[in-house]
Amino acid sequence: MKRSLINSNIEWAMDLCKEMNFNLPSFAFWTPEEWEAKKGPETDRMVEVGLGWDVTDYCSGDFDKVGAVLFTLRNGSMTDPGRPYCEKMIAMKDGQILPCHFHYDKTEDIINRCGGTLCVQVWNSTSEEDGYKVDKESDVHLYCDGQPITVPAGGVVKVSNGNSITLTPYVYHLFYAEGGPLIVGEVSKVNDDAKDNHFTEELHMTIEEDEPVRHILCGGYVME
């Protein structure tokens, strides 16, 4: 994915948050120079738990179709039980898809904060011995805002503004925005995205540096 697309889509997400009165913390707007100046004890914890921006097209080559802008507002350390929770914001364009995956450990509430309709397609996973395949037969049992629901394999749950869906480990899920751009909230158990995500296809995104960095990603705090 080109650095220019990463820069411009973070700025798009900032504008969307402003338009929808979703206030981001001040560090969301730090420049690379500010991150560099604050390097050390002031930001060590933020770096350790991966706070800040992330942008990916999930190796699709078409960000507007398959991709997302994410911002981790708070997260705990996997080795420190003092903060056992995580909160993220996900900005999605109308029709944009976040591809099929599950989590090995994380339970998460996915919340439609504002904008269009959040559509969540779900399946169970088969066992590890069976290769964690997408189970296209069995019903999926979930909760939406504490209320139990049963969804057929591959069924879509439409989540309107202010409402949420709870996703437990080994439940495959795919999101997309419908009817307009969308701000999604995620409240979950503390997590490590590098180890806890299982996608149906292997993803190895690289960045093409076609312009200078304007916004540091959560995996890129170390400045050269």
Image: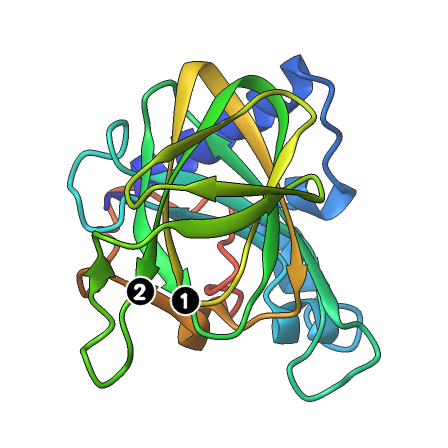
The quadrant the C terminus occupies is: bottom left
**x and y percent of residue 111 in the render?**
62, 37
Q: Amino acid at mark 2?
A: Ser
Expressed as whole percent of the image width and height from the top left, the position of residue 36 reads 62, 62
- Asked if residue 186 is positioned above or below residue 4 in the image, the reply reads below
In the rendering, which numbered label is found on residue 125? 2
The residues bearing labels 1 and 2 have C-alpha atoms spaced at a distance of 6 Å
- Compared with 126, 34 (above or below) is above
Q: Which residue is mark 1?
A: 170
For residue 160, side relative to residue 181 (left or right): right
Label 1 sits on what residue type? Answer: Tyr
Side of 136 where 195 appears, left or right:
right
The image position of residue 9, as x and y in percent, is 41, 31
Q: Nearer the viewer, residue 144 or 90?
A: 144
Counting from the top left corner in percent of width and height, residue 141 is at 49, 51
| Residue pictured at 50% horizontal, 19% vertical | 117
Q: Residue sitting at 24 percent across and 43 percent down? A: 2
> Count of labels shown?
2
Secondary structure under the numbered disc 1 in the rendered image: loop
Instruction: Give the crowd class for mark 1: few <14, some 14-19, many >=20 residues within 10 Å.
Output: many
Q: Earlier in the sequence, mark 1 or mark 2?
A: 2
Q: Which residue shows up at 37% across the image and 32% down it?
A: 156
Q: Dot 2 lies on which element?
A: strand
Q: Nearer the viewer, residue 30 or 161?
A: 161
- Tag 1 and tag 2, C-beta contact below 8 Å: yes
> Which of the 4 quarters of the picture holds residue 69?
top left
